[in-house]
Image: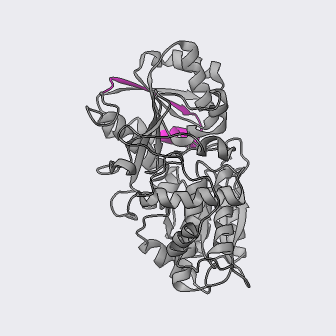
Amino acid sequence: MTGAIVAVGLVVSSFGTLSGAALDSRSSAYPAYPSGDLTSADIALAAGYTGGTANHAAAGRPVVVGWLNDDADTVAYPENTAGAVLAAWLVNKYLGGIKGHPIQLDACQVNNAGDGASCAEQMVADRVKVVITGTVVDGNAAIYNTLAAAHIPVVEGNGFTTTDLAPPGKGTVVDYMPAAAGMILGLAKFIGTSRSGFGLGFAPKSIAAVYTNDTGGTTAFEELFKTDKYLKGITVHGVSVSPTADASQVQAAVTASGAAQDSVFVPLTPVAQCVSVYNALKTLGIKPTVVTTGLCFGTPLIEALGGTFPKGWYFGDYGVNYFMYDPKVAASRQLGVFIAAVHQDNPSMQYTGFAGPSFANILTITRLYNAIGVNATSSQLAKRILAFRGPQFGLSGPLKCGFEHVLPALCGDEVGVAQFDSDGRWVPVEDAYNNRLINGFPGFTP
């Protein structure tokens, strides 16, 4: 399977490294998320969301839920599966499962071309009633067609390609996140409508967008970023690189494109190429403003900078992030439950990136199952899936499935941006923390 560019952070393998950092904002201090085990309040909060019973373990016949993800491709997203498995652990050990029954993931890896078709066929053969995806690219049309024919609803993780945004067939497909489309459009709005007090605080004349030349990266640039209405009148240089490009190759591509003079750089790349972009900028001796996705939160970038992040860089998120805790913000309080579960059950897991949203999807499916019962049919689940208006656990903003914009699978609208500022502090810029979430969809036409 070809690698995909996605719009949220990827891998941080050391839980303690980041969760213990001192964090604040421009206007008020934000502590790190609590680094202890689950508390009774954490468990009660999660049980209230799922409709389960706090501090009760599940037993008996499991309720099987389909799970598809790219765990091992050249550009893979194993943190999706880590988050989903962690959620199942929490549900089964502390939240009473689904009406007392444990939830069980029927997992299939979509790592290579053709895997999507065979994984969808596995879901049908195993008679699952609902399928949840992490991040997949190749084979997704076959996934949607096969599952639609079997009337099995799909809850997506980070849908990215045109097929994800407007899936084929007549089946039920939703994405409770803004996903890559929402993130890229939100970043374009953040940059293109910048003015005093908003966005970057200045209106850039030119932008360099560094993207990978695979399906996902090309979609990010050509369909979502380059032609976006928010960037009208701004020169956009596309810098296309390989999904395995090193710093010298990125540097050469930047020079060849004429982008070295641009005031703003936007890496739309996997984490390894975020490192390459950082090193290329350093070698070129240029210091543009950098706006990127949370994909760049990953371990390789942190290691390249000696345990920190690039100062001054802006990072997109889904309203709250893994580094600023505010218990007054509902999504941040919920994300704290996730981080406590990580600390207790699997502190070495890749807990950033899609781990949190995948954790949330499992809790939401548990909630919908609990509202119906263990013998829920695909038809009953599909109705509940379409009717769910959120907010999703640990994410910000209401859900509007297919109604506000023309991308039928997408339900989430709002994203945020935080900055690791020049003083080495995480600060919200336009986020749930300061009630300034960004919606890039109004008026959007793909």
Whether residue 243 is visible here, answered yes or no, is: no
Name the outermost residue toward the left. 196
Q: Kindly indicate the quadrant of the structure image that contains residue 124.
A: bottom right
Q: Kindly indicate the quadrant of the structure image that contains residue 110.
A: bottom right
The mark tally for this picture is 0
Q: Is residue 48 above or below residue 284?
A: below
Q: Is residue 415 magenta?
A: no
Residue at screen point 42% across, 74% down: 387
Residue at screen point 46% across, 51% down: 318
Along the line of sight, the residue nearer the viewer: 242 or 338: 338
Whether residue 422 is visible here, answered yes or no, is: yes
Indicate left or right for 345 with 411 as reference: right
Q: Position of residue 79 (x, y in %)?
A: 66, 51
Q: Is residue 319 above or below residue 213?
A: below
Residue at screen point 54% across, 57% down: 336
Along the line of sight, the residue nearer the viewer: 217 or 279: 279
Q: Position of residue 113 (x, y in %)?
A: 70, 50
Residue at screen point 63% across, 33% down: 302
Indicate left or right for 11 with 240 as reference: right
Q: Is residue 210 magenta?
A: yes
Q: Position of residue 193 (x, y in %)?
A: 29, 36
Q: Is residue 428 above or below residue 343?
A: above
Color scheme of the displayed model: one colour
Q: Kindly indicate the quadrant of the structure image that contains residue 122.
A: bottom right
Task: Give the magenta-colored segment's residue range.
Answer: 203-220
Q: Position of residue 177 (x, y in %)?
A: 47, 57
Along the line of sight, the residue nearer the viewer: 188 or 123: 188
